[in-house]
Amino acid sequence: MNATINYAELVYALRPEIALTLGLLLALGYDMAFGRRMSDCARRGVAVLIGIVTLASAVFQTLHTNVPPVGHAAYWFHGAFVYDTLAHGVRLGVFGLSALTLLLIAGSIPHSALRTPHFKHPAEYVAIQLLATMGFSLMAVSNNLLIAFLGFELASLSLYVMAGFDKTSRASAEASLKYFLFGGMAAAFMLFGFSLIYGMTGTIVLPEIARALAVQGPSPLLLVALVMVLVGFGYKAAAAPFHQWAPDVYQGAPAPAAALIASASKLAGFAFFARLLFSGLGTVSGDAINFGGPAGWIMAVIIISAASMLLGNIAALAQTNARRLIAYSAIAHAGIMLLGVIAVRAEGAGPLFYYALTYGIATIGVFGVFAAIERTAPCQRISDLAGLWKRSPFLALVLFVCVLSLAGIPPLAGFFGKFYLFAAALYLNGLMSPAGWLAFLAIAMSAVGLYYYLVILKAALVTNATAGTSASTEKIRVPLGTVIALATSAALTIALGIWPDVVLGLFK
Amino acid sequence: MSLLPWTIYLSFAGAFVALVAGARCKCAARVTALVFSLAALGVTAFAAFDFTPGPALQTLVNVPWIPQLGVSYHLAADGISLTLVVLTGIASVAGILFSWNIEENVGEFFALYLALIGGVYGVFLSADAFVLFVFYEIAIVPKYFLIAKWGSTNREYGAMKLVLYSFIGSALVMAGLLWAFASAATILKANGYAPSFSLSVIAQVAAQFSHAQQLGMFALVFTGFAVLAGMFPFHTWAPTGHVAAPTAASMLLAGVVMKLGAYGCLRVAIPLFTEGYAAFAPVIGWLAVIGIVYAGLVALVQEDFKFVIGYSSVSHMGFVLLGLAAGNLASLGGAVLQMFSHGIIAGLLFAVVGRMVYERTHTRNLADLTAMPLHKLMPFAAVVFVLAGLASMGMPGFSGFPAELSILVGAWKTSHIWTLVAACGVLIAGAFTLKVVHVSFFGKANVFEGSQEKARAAHDFPPITWPEKIGALILVASMIIIGVKPGLLLNWINPALESPAFQAAMNALKGGL
């Protein structure tokens, strides 16, 4: 490693981020110059279009990056950035997911629309979402505690704003504040953990940390650092027992913002978490294969994962609010993704990536349907979905596909994600290992999950909206942007389920 | 033979076409469904004439699907698969004829119906554990909507209970299969092979699993499938679900979906984990005979006509499980024959009760029915029901006789007590069948004062329609043909049971007991 600073390499490493920055400046500048003279609809359309084009160019830049073969990684800028198949996949994934959620805010609003003030400043919304996306992208390539933290915070701060973008809604403000308070605390924990790790090893570059820790071995201080990092990450990922903010945020935030929080944010977060744990702290992981092996973070991750699956699935049973239900199901899914983090040891990041990606796509579908319904009538309680099949067969069909994918029914992507992830966990030592027990718990809990997913689908497809219920019977006109986003997520959910090797091919 | 996979594709294509056609016109949806299911039956018949019985699974399609996991889209058939595919074809056509009178959301109904059928065909034809499992789960969700949307008594409860039982069963299967796959992959990798989900590959490697692994995997996979086969004490979903379901769905549930479970036990659990099979066969045998007698006794005291049939299904499926537990050529062959026979008979019984009787009388309460002289009001239904009842009791000349006889003969070689208890079950079946025939169809008017109004209204019953008559005739004919010439199917089934995989399982059992 030479001491000269090669800025060309830095630019090469961060081309997608540069594209995003230019795009967000363009969106803001255009809106400032011409936006006020345009109709609301056109203004929103232009902002979304700029956002989509920006994300497309970021995808283009990513596709023109040299990806090292599977199992190898390229390091840039003195090891600050790493590029491997996981980073490549996550970048493409977050740009795609971000584009899907952006499309949800495009399109005209019918006259009967409820107040939807977050559409009043579309360019700001788009700009902030692009900033968040930049944070995700940085997390994907960071190989260094500091860059990772910057990425985390860039994304989180943008997401706080997006959660509170509906300025006239109390729920939205509450969501934003809760998210901010919990997120800020999580950031503090995580940073404290990072600083302890730095203090012990004298480096912030992940592979060097691993080398230093391999020499030092486990120590009480390291234990404190691990706990801090896990607590911080647990908050960010909404894993139990650090999940309390999630239901309120999912309920109160504007649907497109909630969709981004549930999709791209998860994908980037878990990818970085897996990288941190394996390439940074891999030497102090402990044993996932046998009971009673050396202690390490694996046992802690297993406990958090089991707690998330149990709490998420069981608490979801009691929900009457559709969005809170999805939030609790997200907690349960976070538990499964934590199992995926452990399974990285056996099969690499492929199962985790596939799971997080397809989970994100299906969740965007669900939130997109909620957003579309909200244009004519409130969509909070499960009973608000009644008669959806009559009101809009398209929305009902998308909901059917996406919710069944979340439930893990073949041939949808959610099924294969689950199947592959559990298979990877069982590679470790069948059902006779801690990871195997966790996988068995996850499989058992999926039956609990099916119950509440069917409750949603029953409301949408079986129950008729009658005069006694709150649900409207008005037909729903779905705007073009939403149609594109929803049709894409449903089609991807089906296609990736039937041809999973399209995604898995990246990793093997 | 190579046409057989088209049964799957035709069913799924039919589901899509019916959904589209149903949006325009109800009749189009019905005709579409009938045409596609007839086409699938035609393909099956064509394949059946072309079929040379033999011990090996005859590969129909085999293309790599997900190389990362060693999954191939591998479909194959032997005599056992073909028997059940024929059953599915007949039951699906009959089911569509018996649901000709569905008026609400016709397109959606037939779309879900055909999607379910497609999944069932897929399970019977899979030779890869992953493919089998995928089709197995595809068949779960349509059941929920068929029952919850078009069902009757307590439909949402029944639908949810049924689907959760099925899904918990499939979760156990998934855990067991994944465990087996992961353990097999470790062994395969150590010897320089790629991991594989192929049933035959796993079966070969499974011999090297430890005893504890064999027991654990067999327990998970067998229990998971047996839930769907209605094994005591996991059978309670069956009566509730059957009663709540619309006629065609009850016909399918009892007729073919319960067979999915039994087929999974026979095709996956038994040949893969022979040591586990040998260890658990006594337990299964006892649960089977308890189920036969218990469900029969419960059927004896039911007030609801459909519950009687629902419990009788559980009782008859007990014979299948007994055949599996006894584990010799006669009992396994009998078990497969019983799957076919019960599929036809249960379909017919549910058709008479759900479609012919309930749709006209609007009651299934035996006390109400006995006040209507149904044998005079609907003689056709009465004749069909008596025939189906005779078959269900195991009368010679009907398909139930050779099947149950073969199972009992096989079981006698393994355990005399099981056979004696199961024989009591046959008597109980006779008792509840005769009772229900007598009470429901040959009741006397004016027995109960309170029911007179209903009895009077009874004279305005619409006549039995042509689709019903054709559907009933198809089922009666299959029942009698197989009863008179069981060799037609046994000539397919027995060679298949002579394959090395089943022979290994039977030998393991001989050593174990």
Image: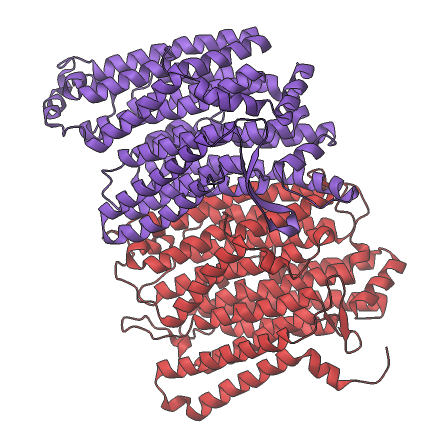
Q: Which chain is red?
A: A
Q: Is residue B180 left or right of A463 when viewed as pictured? A: right
Residue B19, x across and y down, in percent: 32, 50
Q: Quadrant of the C terminus of chain B?
A: top right
Q: Name the residue at 57% across, 85% down.
A: A22
Give the answer, above or below, for where A462 lies relative to A57: above
Q: Is residue A87 visible?
A: yes
Palette colour of chain B: purple
Q: Which residue is the extreme one toward the bottom?
A: A33
Q: Position of residue A283 (x, y in %)?
A: 82, 56
Seen in the picture, residue B72 relative to A398 is either above or below; the reply is above
Q: Which residue is more in the foreground, B121 or A98?
A: B121
With B433 as the anchor, is A44 left or right in this view? right
Q: Residue at x 44, y 43 (%)?
A: B6
Vertical placement of A122 versus B182: above or below?
below
Depth check, front residue: B377 or A44: B377
